[in-house]
Image (tube, grey):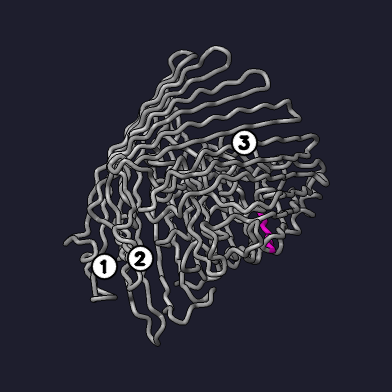
């Protein structure tokens, strides 16, 4: 485990960022409009308001097609249309980051920057293949470049707090330069203690999180540009009610370099990145260990290297096409240790030196057929090679090697994945549009599904290198329209999955993986209204997952969900009321070990607001769970908190007041 502090440049700069508004005030006389960011499906949220949340991914709760699985105060796992984990890709400014925890304490969304509040977009179908095929969904996070508006500097500072869990945060970002060349420093720190649920019970959820980032860009008169970024995140003393271990330390280092330039009637771009994550979890440093339990610790790392080249062209006003190639390598290593004695002893090679190499090529084109129609199609091929380089090493009970646990003689696997899509869009009378998309997405099983090798006296969790690739065949029909102050968008979709990777309990203490055939069906609807001052939005989503081999439900499928919002805004002030509802979920799969049981329905009422105090200062507030209900999403983890043994799932916070003050220049 590396013990490196945040970059000294970033730490030193954060103290000085609070002085920059005074300098900026001397450079400009007119107030700056509040910075707004774009979120899924055109919703707009204010930066300061969302910086009060423990993780930016919490913004997606306004979309009922997205659920968040909670294990503690951090590490919220997005579930899109009933699919999660390996089936949901997360791209941070175009780069893919893999987690370093076999138990997914650190999903990729936990690396989203709170200081820069990236725009979030959720994609559920292959309407482009440049970032890979979409099995369940993609979360695209995009950090906006600084906007100088003729000034020498720009930035913001936010200070906030919450009462439930005594949360505190400070984050800042400041840039100097112009649109052609700029340098930006950003960083932040936030912490919280254990919060209380609606019944007043403590939930293990405390954490500390620090982040720092430096990025810069330069654009020549010819249009050639270069962008670079370096960031570091340190999570410390993170507690999890939904796990038998906590995470005393997780460090993430990201490096990104992008080049591009105009070419012919389009442009080319080249993106290179590196992501290194070190993670420690144990059962003793942050909790009282029972006398009959041994001290256990897992040290794990993941390293990602990637390179992507894309050529975009628009040879005519009616035609667009793109082609590209990308290469990505990943290395995972995780060892479960017994640290009771003087010398740590290896118990299990949970990720036995797993390596993955992936090379992909794609091509896609879109053609406008007059002013009323547009068609598109794309094809992608990925070559994936995986191997567990330590799988023949015997440790722990027996001792036993991962190969023996898998029941195979060779852990090396090669996949040839062919994915594609075809889409058509029609403009209909009365400002309506109809979109039909058909796609095939092939996913190679992930590192845990193929190679996890936990084998202890109490339980086992064994992967399957012989798993076949997962093939998703999707069909989606969407109707969107608007009339006067109203807008609407109903969607129906189906996903037929061949060789779905199913996690199941071979025995009550033995978790395994196998292929089955599955089907997911869903409907979504959105209805909005606004007169410029008042606005209303109603959103609904339902999904049904079926294990067709065993004729039963798939695990971790969210129930019918509905979100109603009512907003008011005038002269920069805004107030929003939100009502989140979900029906009970009784279609579960107890044999998976993932569903904690049936779940009751719930209704949660939230209030939030934003108010400009001066041209540079904004006050944001939120009152979450106004009626102090005790509730948990169906998809949240089973509660293993010894101080709250009656709770079935990790409960959400009870009534919580959050407030933040943001200065911008």
Q: Is residue 456 above or below residue 555?
A: below
Q: Nearer the viewer, residue 266 or 201?
A: 201
Residue 442 falls in image quadrant:
top left
- Residue sitting at the far bottom: 342
Residue annotated with mark 3: 43
Q: Is residue 230 visible?
A: no
| Mark closer to the chain start, 3 or 1 | 3
In the rendered image, which residue does mark 2 sit on? Answer: 333
SS at circle 1:
loop
Distance from disc 2 to disc 3, alpha carbons, whole Å, reads 40 Å
Closer to the chain start, of discs 2 and 3, is: 3
Rendering quarter of residue 572? top right
Is residue 63 in the magenta section? Answer: no
Magenta segment main secondary structure: strand
Q: Is residue 532 visible?
A: yes
In this rendering, position of residue 211 left or right of residue 661? left
Q: Alpha-carbon distance for marks 1 and 2?
A: 9 Å
Q: Is residue 195 above or below residue 605?
A: below
Callout 3 secondary element: loop
| Above or below 427: residue 421 | below
Which region is colored magenta?
Answer: 166-173
Q: Which residue is mark 1?
A: 390
* Label 1 close to label 2 by CB (< 8 Å): yes
- Measured from the top left, where is residue 551 in percent x and y? 31, 40
Horizontal side, residue 395 vs residue 66: left or right: left
């Amino acid at each position: 485990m590396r013990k490196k502090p945040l970059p000294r440049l970033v730490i030193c700069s954060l103290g000085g960022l609070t002085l920059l508004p005074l300098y900026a005030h001397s450079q400009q006389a007119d107030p700056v409009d509040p910075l707004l960011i774009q979120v899924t499906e055109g919703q707009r949220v204010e930066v300061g308001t969302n910086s009060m949340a423990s993780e930016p991914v919490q913004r997606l709760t306004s979309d009922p097609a997205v659920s968040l699985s909670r294990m503690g105060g951090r590490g919220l796992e997005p579930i899109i249309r009933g699919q999660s984990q390996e089936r949901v890709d997360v791209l941070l400014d175009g780069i893919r980051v893999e987690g370093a925890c076999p138990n997914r304490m650190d999903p990729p969304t936990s690396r989203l920057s709170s200081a820069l509040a990236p725009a979030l977009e959720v994609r559920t179908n292959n309407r482009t293949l440049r970032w890979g095929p979409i099995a369940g969904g993609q979360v695209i996070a995009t950090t906006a470049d600084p906007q100088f508006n003729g000034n020498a500097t720009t930035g913001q500072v936010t200070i906030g707090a919450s009462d439930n869990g005594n949360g505190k945060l400070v984050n800042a970002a400041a840039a100097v330069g112009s649109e052609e060349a700029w340098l930006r420093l950003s960083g932040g720190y936030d912490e919280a203690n254990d919060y209380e649920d609606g019944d007043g019970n403590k939930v293990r959820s405390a954490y500390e999180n620090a982040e720092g980032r430096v990025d810069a860009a330069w654009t020549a008169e010819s249009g050639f540009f270069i962008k670079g970024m370096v960031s570091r995140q340190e999570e410390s003393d993170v507690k999890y009610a939904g796990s038998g271990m906590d995470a005393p330390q997780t460090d993430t280092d990201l490096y990104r370099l992008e080049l591009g330039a105009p070419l012919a009637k389009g442009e080319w771009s080249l993106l290179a990145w590196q992501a290194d994550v070190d993670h420690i979890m144990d059962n003793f440093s942050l909790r009282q260990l029972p006398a009959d339990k041994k001290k256990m610790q897992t040290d794990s790392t993941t390293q990602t290297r990637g390179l992507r080249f894309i050529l975009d062209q628009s040879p005519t006003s009616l035609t667009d096409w793109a082609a590209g190639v990308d290469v990505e390598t990943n290395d995972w290593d995780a060892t479960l240790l017994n640290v009771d004695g003087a010398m740590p002893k290896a118990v299990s090679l949970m990720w036995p030196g797993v390596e993955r190499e992936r090379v992909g090529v794609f091509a896609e084109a879109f053609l406008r057929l007059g002013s009323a129609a547009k068609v598109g199609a794309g094809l992608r091929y990925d070559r994936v090679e995986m191997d567990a380089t330590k799988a023949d090493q015997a440790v722990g009970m027996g001792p036993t090697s991962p190969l023996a646990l898998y029941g195979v003689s060779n852990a090396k696997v090669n996949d040839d994945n062919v994915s594609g899509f075809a889409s058509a869009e029609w403009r209909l009378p009365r400002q309506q549009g109809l979109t039909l998309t058909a796609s095939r997405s092939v996913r190679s099983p992930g590192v845990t599904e193929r190679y996890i090798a936990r084998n202890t006296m109490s339980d086992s969790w064994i992967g399957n290198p012989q798993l076949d690739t997962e093939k998703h065949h999707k069909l989606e029909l969407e109707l969107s329209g608007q009339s006067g102050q109203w807008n609407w968008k109903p969607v129906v979709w189906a996903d037929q999955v061949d060789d779905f990777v199913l996690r199941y309990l071979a025995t009550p203490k033995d978790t395994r993986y196998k292929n089955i055939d599955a089907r997911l069906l869903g409907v979504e609807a959105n209805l909005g209204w606004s007169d410029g001052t008042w606005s209303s939005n109603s959103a609904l989503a339902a999904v049904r997952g079926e294990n067709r081999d065993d004729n039963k439900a798939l695990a971790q499928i969210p129930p019918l969900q509905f979100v109603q919002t009512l907003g008011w805004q005038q002269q920069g002030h805004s107030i929003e009321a939100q009502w989140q509802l979900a029906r009970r979920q009784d279609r579960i799969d107890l044999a998976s070990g993932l569903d904690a049981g049936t779940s009751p329905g719930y209704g949660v009422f939230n209030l939030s607001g934003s108010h400009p105090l001066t041209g540079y200062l904004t006050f944001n507030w939120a009152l979450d769970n106004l009626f102090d209900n005790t509730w948990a999403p169906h998809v949240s983890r089973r509660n293993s908190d010894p101080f709250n043994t009656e709770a079935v799932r990790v409960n959400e916070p009870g009534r919580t007041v959050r407030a933040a003050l943001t200065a911008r220049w």
